[in-house]
Amino acid sequence: MADAQLTLQPRTVIGKKVKQIRREGLVPGNVYGRGLESISVQAPLTEVRQVFRSVPRNSVVNVQIEGESATRPVVLRKVDRNPLTGEVRHVELYQVDLTRVIQSQALVVIVGASEAVHNGGTLVQALDTVGLEALPLDMPAEIEVSIGSLVNFGDVVHVGDIELPVNVRALLDASAQIVSVVAPRLEEVEEVVVEEGLEGVEGEEVEGEVAEGEEAAGGEGSSD
């Protein structure tokens, strides 16, 4: 379990009035969990950022809600931000049972080198995250995916190919693609059509013109 700990205050302000506590530097949130009643909380935004930036993704953090004697193990489940300003508007903290598996997303980290890419292929990453199931303390923050096996154009690394930590299970089908190499596109060679001019072929009669040494039709004939 991470050593990080966060103190939360019970929150009585709800609805549109939460704008006021945001102006005071506080961020509203909720602590909820399996079979538990959701609790409205708040905390200084600077402290929330400091705690969750100091631990890896999916880490379990102890939160102390003022007025309670025991801490609660939680993971950061969701951060709601203003789409225009990026301001944090709300956080969701999921209280976990350390003996029960949870589901979460781990980041895909590409490692190694691919011979196919070295030879001009394009690396295509189909998944940025992989859904996993594990006990809260076993849940990884990221999954390393080696591309060393991508030797030929068209080679693929599937979910079933990656080596997961012990007691961690992928939620996606084993055949789901994570990364692949696409062959380089051949440059299209435009066919150049050379149009010959009217005088382009020597010695060939061209319609509408009179070949040298012949009279034009309808011209003056020899007089009798």
Image (spheres, grey):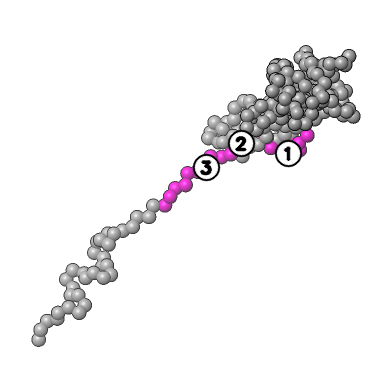
Q: Return the x and y of residue 182 as percentages of the image width and height.
A: 58, 39
- What's the CA distance linking mark 2 and mark 1? 16 Å
**Image check: 69 left or right of 17?**
right
Residue wearing tag 3: 185
N-terminal of the pair, mark 3 or mark 1, is 1
Element on which disc 1 rests = loop
Q: Nearer the viewer, mark 2 or mark 3?
A: 2
Magenta span includes 68: no
Q: Amino acid at mark 2?
A: Val
Residue 175 is marked as 1
Amino acid type indicated by mark 3: Arg
Relative height, residue 130 to residue 60 (above, below): below
- Measure the C-alpha gap from mark 3 to mark 1: 26 Å
- Mark 2 vs mark 1: give the one in front: 2
**Above-or-below relation of 135 to 219:** above
Q: Range of the magenta residues?
A: 170-191
Q: Are marks 3 and 1 in contact (CB under 8 Å)?
A: no
Name the residue located 82 percent from the left edge and 24 percent from the top edge.
12
At x 19%, y 75%, the residue is: 216
Q: Residue, x 65% and y 36% (percent of image)?
A: 126
